[in-house]
C-alpha cells in the first residue's frame, strides 16, 4: 500500500499535478531500513505542532504582472518603496508567452521582514498599468506572522516635508538623545499622491528601545524635523505590556549637555552687544534655572561659528539671533542630564536670553 502511494506521488510530480494533495507523504524519507517522517523539534525539545509545509514563509507571491516585466523592474519598484534591504531575491515566471500576465516570488530574509514589506506596499500598487497582487506564498503565513511579530518595536513618523531624507530623521533622533540600532524605511516622494504628507517607518532592535525612544520624544514635546513637528506614533499591543523607564540605559544617553544662550530680541543696537555673557555669568544663569539640580562640571566650549558670536538677523522676522559661546554641563549620570535638559531647553533667563540645550556628543576626530 505504501509503495502504491509513493508511485502516485512520483506520477504527480512528473505530470505537474499539485503536490499539496500528497503533503502527508512529502515529508517521508528513507533511513536504510524503512520510511520515516521528518519531525522538527521546538526549542524545548517538543515536536513541532505544524508540519513542514505549514510553517511561516518568508516568500511573497506577486501576481497579475505584465508579461514584459523584468526582475530589474521589480527590484527598482521595491527599492522605491524603501524595502530593498529586506529582499534577498526576486524571481519571475513569465515564460508563458500565450498569456498576457505573469507572476513571481519575492524572497525575504525572514517572515517578519516579509510582513514589513507587505505593510509598506500600497494596496493599489501598479506596475506598467497592472494592479499587482501581493500575498504570502503560503495562505496561513499572514496570520501566523501577525501573531508572532512584535509590532511594538515599530514607530511611525508622519507629517514630513517632501525634502526630508533618512539622514534628517537620524539626526533628529540623535539630537533627542536616542541611541541604539534602528532601521528607517521611507518610500520615494513621487509615490505619494498630491500634497499628502510624507512618512517613515522606524524599526528598532527591541520593543523596549522603541518605547524608550517614544518616551524621550514625548518628554521633549515632540520630534522636530526641518522646523516642523512630526507625527510620532507607536504601535501598542494590549497583550504585551512593556515597562520602560526613561531614560533607558540601552539608549546610552550621554551624561552631559551643551547649552547656548540666544538673543531673540528685535533690537540690534550697540547696547544689545553688551549682553554677551562671560563663562562665569553663563554659569550663574544655569544655576538659576536648574535650582537644586547641580552639574558636577562646567566647561566653556568654542562657538561653532568661526566668525564670532553673533549671527545675522533673520530677514523675515527681523529677529536678531546672536549665538553665545557654548557651555558644556557634565552630570553624575544620564538621569541628571535628562532632567536638566527638560528644564533648560526653551527656558528664558532673567537677562532675556533664550536657552538652547542638547545632549553633548564628542566631535568626530576625522572632521
Image (spheres, rainbow, N blue to C red):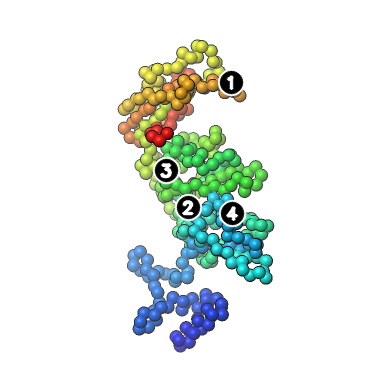
Q: Residue at x 56, y 45 (%)?
A: 199
Q: CA distance from mark 3 to mark 1?
A: 39 Å
Instruction: List the residue tagged with mark 3.
Output: 212
Q: Is residue 293 above or below residue 108?
A: above
In the figure, residue 252 lies in which quadrant?
top left
Which is nearer the N-term, disc 4 or disc 3?
Answer: 4
Instruction: List the residue tagged with mark 2.
Output: 151
Front residue of 166/195: it is: 166
- Of circles 1 and 4, the one toward us is 4
Which is nearer the N-term, disc 1 or disc 2?
Answer: 2
Q: Is residue 54 left or right of residue 61?
A: left
The x and y percentages for residue 27 are: 44, 75
The x and y percentages for residue 275 are: 46, 15
Instruction: List the residue tagged with mark 1.
Output: 318
Q: Secondary structure at mark 3?
A: helix
Which is nearer the N-term, disc 4 or disc 2?
Answer: 4
Front residue of 58/246: it is: 58
Q: CA distance from mark 2 to mark 3?
A: 15 Å
Q: Residue at x 47, y 38 (%)?
A: 171
Q: Which mark is residue 77?
A: 4
Q: Is residue 248 left or right of residue 353?
A: left
Q: Is residue 77 left or right of residue 348?
A: right
Q: Secondary structure at mark 1?
A: loop
Q: Secondary structure at mark 2?
A: helix
Q: CA distance from mark 1 to mark 2?
A: 46 Å
Amino acid at each position: 500500500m505504501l509503495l502504491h502511494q509513493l508511485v502516485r506521488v512520483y506520477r504527480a510530480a512528473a505530470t505537474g499535478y499539485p503536490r499539496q494533495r500528497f503533503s502527508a507523504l512529502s515529508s517521508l524519507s528513507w533511513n536504510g531500513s524503512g520510511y520515516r517522517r521528518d519531525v522538527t523539534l521546538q526549542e524545548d525539545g517538543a515536536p513541532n505542532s505544524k508540519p513542514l509545509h505549514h510553517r511561516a514563509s518568508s516568500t511573497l507571491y506577486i501576481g497579475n504582472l505584465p508579461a514584459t516585466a523584468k526582475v530589474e523592474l521589480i527590484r527598482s519598484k521595491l527599492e522605491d518603496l524603501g524595502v530593498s534591504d529586506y529582499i534577498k531575491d526576486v524571481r519571475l515566471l513569465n515564460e508563458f508567452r500565450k498569456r498576457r500576465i505573469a507572476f513571481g516570488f519575492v524572497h525575504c530574509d525572514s517572515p517578519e521582514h516579509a510582513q514589513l514589506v507587505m505593510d509598506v506596499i500600497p494596496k493599489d500598487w501598479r506596475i506598467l498599468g497592472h494592479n499587482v497582487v501581493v500575498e504570502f506564498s503560503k495562505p496561513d503565513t499572514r496570520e501566523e506572522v501577525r501573531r508572532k511579530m512584535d509590532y511594538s518595536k515599530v514607530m511611525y513618523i508622519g507629517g514630513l516635508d517632501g525634502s526630508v531624507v533618512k539622514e534628517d530623521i537620524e539626526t533628529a533622533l540623535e539630537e533627542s538623545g536616542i541611541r541604539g540600532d534602528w532601521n528607517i524605511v521611507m518610500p520615494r516622494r513621487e509615490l505619494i499622491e498630491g500634497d499628502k504628507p510624507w512618512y517613515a517607518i522606524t524599526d528598532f532592535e527591541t520593543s523596549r528601545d522603541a518605547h524608550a525612544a517614544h518616551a524621550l520624544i514625548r518628554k521633549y514635546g515632540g520630534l522636530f524635523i526641518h522646523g516642523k513637528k512630526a507625527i510620532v506614533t507607536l504601535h501598542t499591543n494590549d497583550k504585551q505590556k512593556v515597562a520602560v523607564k526613561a531614560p533607558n540605559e540601552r539608549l546610552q544617553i550621554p551624561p552631559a549637555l551643551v547649552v547656548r544662550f540666544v538673543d531673540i530680541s528685535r533690537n540690534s543696537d550697540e547696547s544689545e552687544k553688551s549682553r554677551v555673557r562671560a563663562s562665569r555669568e553663563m554659569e550663574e544663569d544655569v544655576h538659576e534655572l536648574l535650582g537644586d539640580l547641580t552639574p558636577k562640571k562646567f566647561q566653556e566650549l568654542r562657538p561653532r561659528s568661526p566668525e564670532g558670536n553673533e549671527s545675522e538677523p533673520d530677514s523675515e522676522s527681523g529677529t536678531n539671533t546672536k549665538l553665545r559661546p557654548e557651555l558644556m554641563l557634565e552630570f553624575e549620570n544620564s538621569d541628571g542630564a535628562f532632567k536638566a535638559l527638560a528644564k533648560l531647553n526653551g527656558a528664558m533667563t532673567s537677562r532675556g536670553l533664550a536657552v538652547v540645550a542638547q545632549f553633548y556628543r564628542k566631535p568626530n576626530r576625522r572632521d
